[in-house]
Amino acid sequence: MSSDSRSDGPGREVTAVGGGLTDPAWLVHAEPERVVAALDGAVGPEEVLAAAVYRASGHLHRDAGARVRRQVLALDAARYGDRELAAGLADVTIDQDAPDPWVVRWATGTGLDSRLRYAWPAPAEVGVVATVVLEGRGLAVAGCEDGTLHWWDPATGEKLGTVVADHTGEVRALVAAAVDGRPVAVTAGSDGTVRVWDLDAGEEVARYHPDGDSRVTALALARVEGRPVVVGCGTDGTVRMWDPAARARGGELPVIRAGIAGALAAAEVDGRPVAVTGHNQGAIRTWDLITGREFGARGDHTEDLRSGSESSGEGGGGGTGRVCGTMQLEARTRLLATDPTFASPLAVSANAHEAYLWDLATGERVGEPLPGFWFAQAAALTVCQGRPAALVAFDRSGPVELLDLSARKSLHPPLTGHHRTVRAVATAVVRGRHLAVTGGEDRSVRIWDLDGEREPTSRPTGPEEPVRKLTTAVLDGRPVMLTYGSDTRVRIRDLDGGGQLGEPVSGPINGLERLTVGTVDGRPTLITRDRARAVRIWDLGTRDQLHGRSTSEYASLSITFFAAVGGRFVGVTSEGRVWDLTASAWIGVQPKQWGALALTTVGGRDLVLTGRGAQEVRLWDLATGEPVGPPLTGHGIRVLAGAVGMLDGRLVAAAGAEDGAVRVWDATTGRPLGTYAFPAGVSALEVTPDGRLVVGFGPDIAVLAHR
């Protein structure tokens, strides 16, 4: 970043040279690096909100052109509930072109979190992250599935470097440290090597090779006799250490025969550096990194532990020595986390179902299993608000939890923003602020201020809980939306603002997978199916549940979605075949493209839209099997959702892809009618009778109108 965009008060300097955080044109057209530099200078509610809007999808702004940036900024302003800013952003002129043909009317903001400071794009899924703080300067480092390594300044958001780590495949393990006054990162990959990178120079400075065919599967960082040491566990059952300053593994550093380990961490117990290993048989063991002995073990037992094979799990046995040794768990230990800054040495371990807190000084488990650690994917320990805390990501799309280890409850609301599984977390204290670094399958790395507040001055509109399923309907001549959220209830909402209309239609439905409304026997009728394949049907006019209307055919695994044809419910397969659930017979002609997306009746014709999983979609006449118009192209990635409807008297088709792009075409001619960019993959798409688009992306929804 050039020096003219830096200052102690970046917001004020940028405003002085033209533009500012409350100027929509500047937000759209200015170089993203300059805008990011100004965000911390926000003053007053309007600028603070504008900064939150820009940060919400910052990982997209850096690589996007002005047109995409205009769309995403307008969407995020609407998600934050600021319709005036959203309208101003949508009206920004770009190269004298006409405004976007689609404009956001309103959107939900359940996936927003104003504690987000920066969001950076990554070229592939992020598997590991680490931090290092050197003389008040912090670095956040990320390793990706494509073998690349990237690092940033978490205080300013500046990208500092990237290298190809030369590992075969992904970067599987990563630690960062300060060595001789310089920041370094240490990586391990499936090729078995451990590599040391000087992050100031952006180059490899050392490489280690485990013995034989062994591969290093996990890394940790410890301090041995005052110097940083990299600890690695290998597929040969050994724990080895390397001194990154010496550029080679010192002969004085012991090799520990720990047995095959599934997880690794480092800590300090009674002033001595230790490695903590988690094993396939559910054991946790602790090792003195100076002597190589199992912590607390005495006499000749150490030699037994170095015999080369996995021990039976009995820890150092007999005598007066304290045995931290083996702590038995009920399943394979897949995760370990420690923090050397804790007043007492603690560790968190997790298997697929539960997590435990351990006192490493006594070797005892502390209390009952920790709450909420179902399929924990990654964890990091830190001190937040003076309390020991665990930052935890789970093996599912969703927020990252911050758990108070003393009170065993959430210390803050979850960090919300990633759209897919978070695979890596780390923490750091930089300039007095507690920061979290997260990365995952949505190909982004994010920095969070754990000392900040989740909510901005403005609140999002519409549903307050994440939306998992949606559809649209017409009730009493009024277009409405039906949503199913994390509260497991189906609700009817106003399409003009997202407000709830009346009480929920349903009681709790766990794991709802199908949500469809159609006109059956002349009545608006809702049909749902859950993961247990239980089918429920309601008359939406009266909101009465209709019992005895479904048969075992409704539970068929071959049904991808339900639709209504000729006043009766049908089931549509992934191949586009249509099964009449009343007549128990196939109807129509199967389309010539796989991947059914929607079945809609328009102008008396039943039309099937196909192309799920493909990069082009097609519309077919169900009665004849003939295509309606040419292939609809433009997506360069898999299509996930689609819809058909009428717009200004024209038959239109819309498709949304996993990169967040929604495209609309004149279905008869194939002419594009506009594209809109969303910050997450599109999971649901509807065209309402009055020509509006309803889009589900990540945990949120947006309603767009055609200009």
Image (cartoon, grey):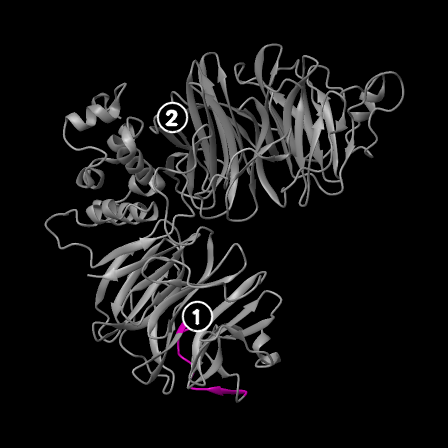
What kind of residue is marked 2? Asp
Viewer-nearest of discs 1 and 2:
2
In the image shown, does 504 or 588 lie closer to the viewer? Answer: 504
Dominant SS type (magenta): loop
Residue 153's tag is 2
Relative depth, front residue between 550 and 298: 550
Residue for badge 1: 595
Give the vertical position of 567 relative to 299 (above or below): below
Quarter-wise, where is residue 695 in the image? Answer: bottom left
In-front residue for pair 492/162: 492
Quadrant of the image occupied by residue 614:
bottom left
What residue lies at 55% left-to-right and 87% top-to-bottom? Answer: 584
Q: CA distance from mark 1 to mark 2?
A: 44 Å
Badge 1 crowding class, 10 Å Cα cut-off, few under 14, some 14 to 19, many 20 or more, is many
Segment colored magenta:
584-598
Reply yes or no: does residue 636 show up in magenta.
Answer: no
Residue 394: image location, x then y, percent: 57, 43
User: Can you give x and y, in whole percent of width and height, for residue 545 in the image?
Assistant: 55, 74
Mark 1 or mark 2, earlier in chain: 2
Q: Residue at x 56, y 73 (%)?
A: 536
Q: Callout 2: few (<14), some (14-19), or many (20+) C-alpha neighbours within 10 Å?
A: some
Q: Residue furthest left?
A: 96
